[in-house]
Image (cartoon, rainbow, N blue to C red):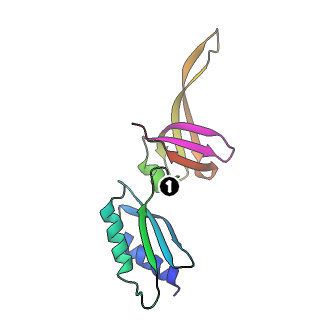
Amino acid sequence: MTFKNKVQELLDVALAQREHLFLIDLSINEANKISIVLDGDSGVNLQDCIDVSRAVESQLDREEQDFSLEVASAGVSSPLKLVRQYKKNIGRTLKVKTISSEEIEAKLTLADDEKITLEWQAREPKKIGKGKETVDKKLEIPYENIKEAIVIISF
């Protein structure tokens, strides 16, 4: 079993005991620096990171393989990668870049296993007469058409 496989197996066990957490990224470089990025259905707190770190580190032998370990939560400005992240952010505003280079900033109203639904209001020229009117817009975007999606934090 390779070092990465062993780490992945230990991480899978640790996350199985903490069902509210899920893995965003696991990387191990040539110097055996293990970087684990987590997210959670209701966020990730410091204790979650500590618990996962201890669960993995306690099962690895530094005499056998020297390593360093870093466990962190996905940052606020990190792009969404998993369907589960979209589902937990329903009701929040996203900035979505599509593969056709379109940029949309809108409220995420629905996320299922195939696509997301965004809703927003736009000012458009009136069909009859001069001036503009406010129009409600709705767009469904399949995940494969999303290049990047970031949650917009508003205060």
Whether residue 116 is visible: yes
Q: Is residue 99 above or below residue 55?
A: above
Depth order, front residue of 153/24: 153
**Residue at the spot x=38%, y=55% of the render?**
41
**Residue at the spot x=59%, y=15% of the render?**
132
Does residue 100 belong to the magenta stretch? yes
Image coordinates for residue 16, horizontal then vertical, percent = 37, 71
**Residue at the spot x=55%, y=30% of the render?**
137
SS label for mark 1: helix
Q: Which residues are magenta?
A: 92-107
Q: Is residue 146 above or below residue 134?
A: below
Image coordinates for residue 155, horizontal then vertical, percent = 39, 36
Principal SS element in the magenta part? strand
Q: Is residue 126 above or below residue 146?
A: above
**Residue at the spot x=62%, y=53% of the render?**
144
Image coordinates for residue 54, horizontal then vertical, percent = 34, 75
Report which residue position mark 1 lands on.
83
Residue type indicated by callout 1: Val
